[in-house]
Amino acid sequence: MSVTLLYTGGTIGSAGVPLDTLPGPEFAALFDAHVRAHLPERVRKATLLHTDPTLDSTSMQPLDWLRLARRIVEIDGDVVVLHGTDTMAWTAAALAFLLQTYSAAGEVTGRLQKRVVVTGSQVPLFDGAGLAEGSDALGNLLGALAAARGGGGAVLHFAGDTLDAARVMKTSCTNWEAFTMPNGPGAATEVPATTAGNVLSSLEKLGAFFGRSAVIPLLAAPGAALGKQLAALASAEGYPLGAVHLLGFGIGNLPEELELTAALQHLRSQQIPVVISTQCPHGRIAPQTYAVGDWLSGCGVLGMGDRTPAAVQVKLHLTLALSALYGWGEQEMRAFLLRHVAGEDPPSGPVA
């Protein structure tokens, strides 16, 4: 199967002082001049495409994930996505969720059968004279091309490791091994193959709703006044509040306060999903263990097991879009949030 390179921007294609993403044509010219000769013969003539515009991944938004998924579906063969590292985990998770189709009941009905490998680098691929000496970029690119050998689903390749797209986190901003799976790989999901046309149709339907409302992460901290923050978010005008992702202490604890309880109950009355994860990179939450966590279920807060923050955020966006598309109520949204659909849960099973 053929492989296409799709450059989106980021450190791997950055230059200048301070570093900034190169436009697609400039990156392509440097790539042809300095990189192609280093590629294995089987992929030396691989097509290089770019998004328009190219973006530092810090600027990536949910609608960019949707556009990227569409672009990937339209490409024949496997795809290696060259991407910035800051939000690479979010994009990888988004591709895991978006390159498949869903029924009105939230069941996965099909998955695109092509390999999508997301990669990037900690140091740019080029310097003023050609390939940057001491960069990890070429090694990551070659590893990603080796990982793009057919099959289905999205993965992230970095520093010699090929990682599950919906289980990966950026755990270092300086080490070569920037990405890990702190809670291990995800469970395999057996899904029948579907056509590019079916996935494009699904993305088109989701496009009217995906990323149209805010999914807000809130970090618990002493003195953070979460109740006041939630009340302010719920009453804000403009960009509507769609869901809240609480990042609690330890195994999912938050101090029980009247203001926070009232805010959570109000959000539930408005059918605004609220979920909770741990702020710790490793571990599975169990809010019911302590009294300071057990009270949350009475306010409708759903625990997200050991899912990564990126996977939780992306799935909340997808849940809101499917809910708007199919007219789901609270019960259907909660069921979908807890269901394992894209490798986001461990082999031990879904969160509930």
Image (cartoon, rainbow, N blue to C red):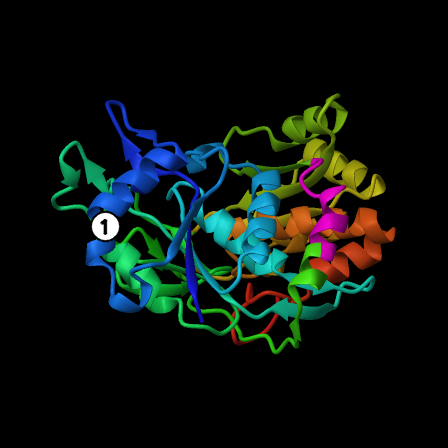
For image coordinates 80% across by 50% down, the residue present is 323
Write down the quadrant of residue 157 in the picture.
Answer: bottom left
Residues rendered magenta in the picture: 201-213
In the image, 75: left or right of 299?
left
Residue 116, horizontal then vertical, whole percent: 47, 61
In the image, 12: left or right of 196?
left
For image coordinates 54% across by 46% down, the residue present is 248
Q: Using the rendered image of the protein, determine whether residue 300 is visible from the camera's viewpoint.
A: no
Q: Using the rendered image of the protein, determine whether residue 200 is visible from the camera's viewpoint.
A: yes
For image coordinates 87% across by 51% down, the residue present is 327
Foreground of the two, 328 or 211: 211
Write down the quadrant of residue 237 in the picture.
Answer: top right
For image coordinates 66% across by 36% down, the residue present is 257
User: Is 264 above or below relative to 175?
Assistant: above
Foreground of the two, 20 or 45: 45
Q: Quadrant of the N terminus?
A: bottom left
Foreground of the two, 168 or 291: 168
Q: To which residue does mark 1 refer? A: 35
Kind of element beneath mark 1: loop
User: Is 164 above or below relative to 211?
Assistant: below
Q: Quadrant of the C terminus?
A: bottom right
In the image, 202: left or right of 147?
right
User: Is 350 above or below relative to 240?
Assistant: below
Q: How many marks?
A: 1
